[in-house]
Structures are given as C-alpha cells and as structure tokens.
C-alpha cells in the first residue's frame, strides 16, 4: 500500500487528503487541535472566508463542492459605507459572478468528513508535530492529551500546517540554502460579531461584502447563514490617531465607532460590551523557497501565507492541490520530480498572490471610497464586456479565473498603465461612456 | 549576585562575557561545541578574519586588545592579481592604516581565556541550547556528552549563538510580530590552504589582502602567522560557465585553476589534491527585528549575520558590545530599557552593514579590476587628504572609523553621486591630478 502523511487537518490538509485517497493512498493526518466537529473550539482565525473560483475548482475535482455549496452565501459585489451612511455598490464581476461567504469551521468539518468517508484517511487529533527528519521521513509528534512523544515513519510528507508551520520551522528552515522571511505588517485585526435581527434576518444586504473604507484603516463585514455578520476591523497596531493602542477602554471603543462608523454603531450600540470577545491579532506575509526537500513538501499557508485582503489565501491553498494533482499525473507519482516542478513553477504564483494581497488592502481601505477609482473600474468593466478577449479586469483574473497569479499580476500592471492614460483624458468624467474612450483603450492594448 | 547567561562562546559571546564581569555579573556561557583550546576541532567557518577599527575599539575597552595584537598581521591594502599575473596594489587607507588578518581559533581562545581569567565567568561546553522560555528566562540545553537535558533559569539572556541562532529560531521567531528573513545568496565558498615556503616564509606579499578578481567570481587570500595563506574561492553554486557544480573532478579543478588563476596555480600545483579538504559552504544574510524580547537579546551574527565581503561581520558583533555597554551605563542596567534602545537604534546599522557587505562583493570581485574604478578611488583619496573634514572615503568610514554603518552607507551614496560627475569630466584620466578636479568636487560637496 502507498502511504502518505499530512501534517495539519486545516482547510488545505483535509482537502488534499481526499485527493490522495483518490490516487490510492492510505493517508494519516496529524492535527494539533482537537476535532472541531466535537469540541467547542473555533477553527482559528476568521470565522468566515470568501471562497471563489480557484477554490471551487479544486473542490469540484474531488466532488466536494456540492456539500460546500449548501453553506455558501454569494456576495455579488462590495457595498461601501461612507461616514454619512451613504451606500455605494460596486459589482465584483459580471452578472452572477460572486464570491462566497463560507463558515471556516463548517467548511473544515465538511472536508474532514469527506476525507474520512473515503475510508482511506484517518485523522489523529491532539498530535502536534515537533520534529521532522527530512532525510528519513520520520516525524515526531507530541500527543497533547497524554504528553507522550509519538514517532511516525512514512513515504511522503505534506506540510499543511499553516502559517506557523512546524514542518517548515523545524524542517525546511534548517536545511542549507532555504530562503525564508516572515514579515508582519503594521496593521492588526479584531473580529466583531454583528448579531442577526430578532427574526433571524440579516441587518445589512446579505449578498454583498460590506466595507467601511476609512483611508488608513477599514471595517468589513461578511454574512453568516444565521443572519449574523462577521465583521473585521483592520487598523495599525500603534502610531497615528486611529490605531488599536488608542482604542482600549469602553469609552474609547464607543467614541471610536460613533465617530468613524456611525451607521454601523447604530446597528450595534453594544459594541463596547463585545469588543473583547475576540483577540487582537497580527497579520504576516511568509515567503519561503524551495517548498520541498526530498519527499517533504509545503502546501497552503505553510508555503505562502499572506495577508487576507484579496480573500485568496485559502483559494490559493486549494489551487496548490489542483497544481500538485496535475503534476502527479505528469510525473507518474515520482514525488521528487513532482515536488521539484511544483516548487519551481508555483513559487512565482505564491509571490504574486502576496504582492496582490498587499495591494488590495489599499484598494479596500482607501481607493474604493474614491469616485475616480470607481469610474476607472466602470470603464474597465465596460471595455471588458465589449472586448472580452482583450481585457479581463485584474480582480476577475484573480477571483473568477484560474489564470496564474503571476500572469494576472503582470497583466494587471500593464492594464494600470493603460488606465492611467485613459483617466488623464480631459473631461473623462463626462465622456467616460463615449466611443473616444473605447478607441483610446483599443489604441493602447 | 547579578546573574547573566550567554548562549554561544564564539567571538562575540566570549568578548561580551568579559564586559559583563566588569559590570559585576556572574556569567554562565553555554557553548554547543567542545572547548576548541583542548579538542582538535576548528572554530568553524573561515580560518582567519580581518579585524579592523570597530573590533579593536571593543577589545580595548576591556583590555583584551594587547593579547590579540600579538597574533594580528597588518594588511595595508589589496593586491590584485590579473590573468597574466600582473599585480596592482591599492592601499586601504592612509599610511599605517591597515586591517589585521587574525586566526579565528586563536582569537576565540584568547577571548575565552580572558573571560575565564576574570574568575566570574564559566563556560559549559557541549551544551546546545534547544529551547528557551522568553517569559520566565528558562533555557533548556542538550548535554551532547551525556544526552541529558539541562534546565537553567537566569536573569538576563544574551543570544550570541551565531547565524543559525537557537535563541532566535526557537525563541524570538515564535513571538508575535517578529520579523525575520534568511536569504542565501547564489554564491558559495570553499577554502584552500596555500602552504608556506619550506623555510616558513610567505609565498605572497604578507602585508596585503590578495584578490584575484574575475568579474562574477573571485579568489582571495589572507596571511597566517605560520607563513601559509587561507584562500577562499567565492563563486556561484550553479549556473553559468564558472560555478561550483562545474568543478568537481581532479581534472576540472586542475583546468579551472590553470586557466583562471595561473599565477596562483604556479604556487600551488597540488590544488586538485587539496580541493576537498574544506567543504563547499553557503552564504546568507539574516535580518531580524526586534532584536530583543523582555530580558533576552540577540548580538552578533544571531542578530545580523551577513555575507563576508566587507570583512565586518565580527567587527560589527564586537561593536554591539560597545553599544550595549554604553546603554548599560545610560539606563543603569535596566535591561528592558537597554534592549529597547539597542534594538531600535542599532537595527539600521545592521541593515546598512548587510547592504554594504553585498555591495562590496561587486567591488572585490569586479570593480577593483577596472582601472577607472581604481582612478576614482585615487581621486577620492587625494581629495580626502586635502580636505579631511569634507570627505572620508566610504571604505575608511566603514573600516577605520566608528561612524555608524547607517550613516556611512548614506554618505557613501552621496559620495557616489559626486564621483559619478567627476568621472564624467572629459579627459579625466589625464587631468585627475589637476586643480580643476578638486574645484569640481568642492563645488559639489
Ligand atoms: C483574518 C483572515 C481572513 C481570511 N480570509 C480569507 C478569505 O476570505 N478567503 C481566503 O481564501 N482566505 C482567507 N484567509 C486565509 C486563509 O485563512 C488561509 O489561507 C487558510 O486557512 C490556509 O489553510 P491551511 O490549511 O494552509 O492552513 P490553516 O487553515 O491554518 O490550517 C493549518 C492546520 O494545521 C494545524 N497545525 C498547525 N501546527 C501544527 C503542528 N505543529 N502539528 C500538527 N498540526 C498543526 C492547525 O491546527 C490547523 O488545523 C484569511 C485569513 C485571515 C487571517
Ligand atoms: C567565510 C567567512 C569569512 C568571514 N570573514 C570575516 C572577516 O574578515 N571579518 C569579520 O569581521 N567578520 C568575518 N566574518 C564574519 C564572522 O565570522 C562572524 O560575524 C562572527 O563569527 C560572528 O560572531 P558570533 O560570535 O556572533 O557568531 P559565531 O562566531 O558563529 O559564534 C557562535 C557560537 O555559538 C555556538 N552555538 C551555536 N548554536 C548554539 C546553540 N544552539 N547552543 C549553544 N551554542 C551554540 C557556536 O558553536 C559558536 O561557538 C566571516 C564569515 C565567513 C562565513
């Protein structure tokens, strides 16, 4: 029997387990946490996340999409809330194109169950990886229930243990010529649960991702199935007027929300009571290379953790499954060849994903509040509808296609230059819908 | 009694131990290796290193310079060897200014002995740090002789355990918002021992650092006291025509040296026999921030490991001692305040050191073979002699002063712009020694 080991039964690890069983592997997954389906613990980090094309595609390949679709709420665009409570809606793509708000815990549970239901994958909980020998494929786990150390020898190892991956820290990072960086950005985040109306309905338009863009910081809200919203405030940890270190006491919380998010405050005047329900957390970009060593490989956040502003972290991790799966066929499961090519070809996509994610923070917290930016996107959308083969907006390339992130990133930069020229046309605000503008773009692409 | 713990009895750790005893501390040093004074092992990495102003200054403060001076060989400049064996000498600074070739092992031994001789520092060998609790100041060591784990609780911890610092990997890297990167450059190095003449004399001019600059790669040689030279070949690991992966067999080694370093080959025709005496090693830049957490701090390579091309790694680590020592007085040994200021103010110097080190690889392997570069440096040296208050060449700022690395780096960039203009004067090769050139520089600074 072919044996494979996965470290981490998070989103990527549990999905990848399903893939491996399809290829006839016996899979053992070691997970540091307890079983989130049984214990009353969260799956960590954000409560819900936006699932989009790359994620769906990877789920579909192994027949896991259907179950997920039942719990996924489509969001067709961004709904911007200004200081006066005025709303502006910006569609994400074409009609029917949406990103899907999905509960992290439920999604993870579906995938773990899917893995177990194959009959070929077993998950060992409360097993924390603490050591790995990359030469002999031996792993050491700490059984957190008994305190004992467990040794496990295997044929091939998939490190799906997230941003703070032990497979990477105690394994790859100690190999010669392994490049690595962990960069925490200046901003942190805190979640806030905006409850449903008493009748269980949503307090805001359910089919949009809500944003309160405030220049240097922002609040966002994604809908949950029970009528509530998971809201997240992203802001600098310290420094400047609006920073987490200035919002501590009940009075400060109250005053901050009253003055900066008045319409949100009106929906949730009890904000000060619930401020401490979720911790203040940090955000980091982690880059590494290579992503493999002999028969061990990194996937998902373990390889390319990013900041969450493009809603692509999980989607990228799921796409890692798609990429590895194709390479498995190509190299006939010669793992070293598979990993070699995966590492070399997928790395630029991980880098691009991270650059795009950082850039999209500016878009969300700042640009979307600027009418000229929205106009720019409207022109792009129009041109793209007229000439779909000549132009796919960057957001669509990233979110609604499976164009490589690195290619999308480059094409986005070219588009940006074109649009800089277009927006410089005198009187563009009046004539944006004219043939002149279309001709201008045609002359530039 | 005040207690302090140092991890690593390398160059920085053993020197810093002397400092701490002067301040009345009882110091315990844990060192992973055996005692290099007793065992027949090398102190690791290069066999000799260039000691310069910042290093001497730190040694002098605690009276350790005198012993070191006995084993230090002055090198007054660079001696370039071209393909035909022609020699060009470029002085490093003013007359009598030199950098000093020093045996790593002997230097380390002098410093360990100095620490022990204070009667207040003890070194525990074969103790490898494997865990650290930054909240409680508890360290765990593996006794490599007995296999037992040793626990040690202390008041303040100095991580002087080098580029692959355990204090950093298992301690600081796991703290929230700790930024870190390890970047291996494309090039590696291999050492070669060029033996003395039979009568014990040196085969090359003893008072120079010898360089065979070859554009994309280089060979250098530093003198040892016994008449031998430690030579180091720096070259890409792979890719291109001249790379380590192309030089493996005896024939390849022979052919490579014969064709690229003919005068060196003439001195050492047995090179192929000795090629494997030293391993092929990698080179990395390691950046981290902050350098402290509560009562634990990083010093030397643990904080800012760099590539060796400016000969400043150890000097910078010794200067860390100078900086910490001054801050200890300033903050009256309030360690958290000391570490806070050390981390914030010294970090830009670590970064500058690393940028300068990378830049100087280009200088050594390439620019010094260019007559126009040498002319440029000659003009700078002349102007600097005439107007010492207006101009100190970058190399002198770094090597013969204690100007902060970050300041030197910036001033160097300004100087570069000035010299670009000077070198663009038509006919500069003829009139470099004229008043016109001096006036030009005066008009620009
Ligand atoms: C605030 C926030 C919002 C986000 N929003 C989105 C979004 O909208 N869309 C999107 O696509 N992405 C989003 N992401 C990113 C997404 O959360 C990650 O990319 C995704 O979780 C990565 O999945 P993973 O399986 O690689 O890692 P994880 O989900 O982190 O899973 C890792 C698993 O490994 C386990 N583990 C860790 N260490 C060990 C060990 N030593 N031994 C054994 N097991 C271990 C963990 O317990 C966990 O179960 C967001 C992230 C954040 C922080
Ligand atoms: C090829 C080369 C040439 C160089 N040339 C120069 C030069 O000319 N001039 C110059 O100034 N610098 C030079 N350097 C840089 C210089 O070697 C370093 O900057 C210097 O050694 C740093 O001193 P350190 O004490 O911080 O670290 P190290 O000298 O590396 O000492 C670290 C000590 O910690 C011990 N240790 C490691 N891990 C543990 C653990 N887990 N537990 C306990 N102990 C541990 C090690 O055994 C070692 O004794 C060169 C470096 C290289 C690689």
Image: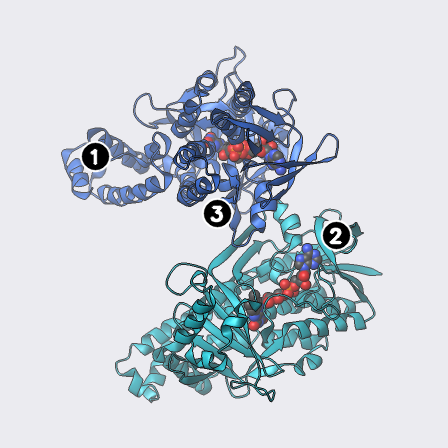
Chain colours: A cyan, B blue
Rendering quadrant holding ligand 1? bottom right
Which-is-in-front pick, marks 1 and 3?
3
The chain letter for the residue carrying disc 2 is: A
Mark 3 highlights which residue? B290
Q: Residue furthest top?
A: B199
Measured from the top left, where is residue A234 in percent x and y?
48, 67
Residue sitting at x 69%, y 54%: A296
Do badges 1 and 3 share one subunit? yes
Query: Spatial distance from mark 2 to mark 3, Cα to Cα?
Result: 30 Å
Q: Which residue is mark 2?
A: A141
Depth check, front residue: B114 or A445: B114
Label 2 C-beta lies within 8 Å of the nearest ligand 1 atom: yes
Q: Earlier in the sequence, mark 1 or mark 3?
A: 3
Residue A159 appears left or right of A150: left
Q: Quadrant of residue B244?
A: top right
- Residue B432 bears which disc, if any? 1
* Circle 2 or circle 1, nearest the eye: 2
Which image quarter holds the C terminus of chain B?
top left
């Amino acid at each position: 029997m072919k044996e494979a080991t996965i470290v981490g039964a998070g989103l990527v690890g549990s999905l990848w387990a399903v893939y491996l069983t399809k290829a006839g592997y016996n899979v053992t997954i070691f997970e540091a946490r307890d079983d989130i389906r049984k214990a009353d613990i969260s799956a960590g980090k954000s409560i819900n996340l936006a699932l989009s094309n790359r994620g769906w595609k990877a789920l579909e390949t192994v027949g896991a999409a259907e179950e997920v679709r039942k719990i996924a709420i489509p969001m067709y665009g961004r709904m911007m809330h200004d200081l006066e409570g005025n709303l502006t809606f910006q569609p994400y793509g074409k009609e029917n194109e949406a990103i899907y708000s999905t509960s992290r815990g439920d999604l993870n549970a579906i995938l773990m169950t899917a893995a177990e239901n194959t009959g070929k994958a077993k998950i060992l909980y409360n097993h924390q990886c603490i050591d790995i020998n990359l030469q002999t494929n031996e792993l050491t786990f700490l059984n957190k229930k008994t305190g004992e150390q467990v040794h496990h020898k295997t044929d091939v190892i998939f490190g799906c243990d997230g941003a703070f991956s032990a497979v990477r820290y105690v394994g790859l990072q100690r190999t010669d010529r392994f490049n690595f960086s962990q960069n925490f950005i200046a901003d942190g985040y805190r979640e806030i649960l905006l409850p449903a109306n008493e009748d269980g309905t949503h307090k805001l338009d359910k089919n949009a991702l809500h944003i309160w863009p405030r220049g240097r910081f922002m609040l966002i809200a994604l809908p949950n199935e029970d009528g509530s919203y998971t809201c997240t405030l992203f802001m600098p940890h310290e420094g400047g007027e609006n920073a987490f270190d200035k919002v501590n006491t009940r009075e400060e919380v109250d005053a901050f929300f009253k003055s900066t998010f008045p319409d949100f405050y009106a929906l949730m005047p009890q904000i000060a009571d619930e401020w401490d329900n979720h911790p203040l957390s940090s955000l980091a970009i982690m880059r590494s290379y290579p992503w493999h060593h002999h028969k061990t490989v990194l996937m998902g956040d373990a390889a390319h953790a990013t900041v969450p502003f493009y809603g692509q972290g999980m989607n990228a991790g799921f796409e890692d499954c798609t990429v590895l799966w194709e390479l498995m066929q190509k190299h006939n499961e010669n793992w070293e060849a598979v990993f070699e090519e995966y590492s070399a070809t997928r790395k630029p996509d991980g880098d691009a994903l991270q650059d795009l994610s950082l850039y999209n923070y500016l878009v969300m917290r700042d640009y979307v509040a600027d009418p000229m930016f929205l106009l720019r996107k409207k022109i792009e959308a129009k041109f793209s509808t007229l000439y779909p083969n000549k132009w796919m907006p960057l957001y669509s390339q990233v979110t609604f296609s499976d164009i490589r992130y690195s290619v999308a990133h480059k094409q986005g930069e070219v588009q940006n230059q074109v649009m800089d020229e277009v927006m410089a046309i005198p009187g563009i605000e009046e004539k944006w819908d004219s043939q002149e503008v279309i001709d201008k773009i045609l002359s530039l692409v």
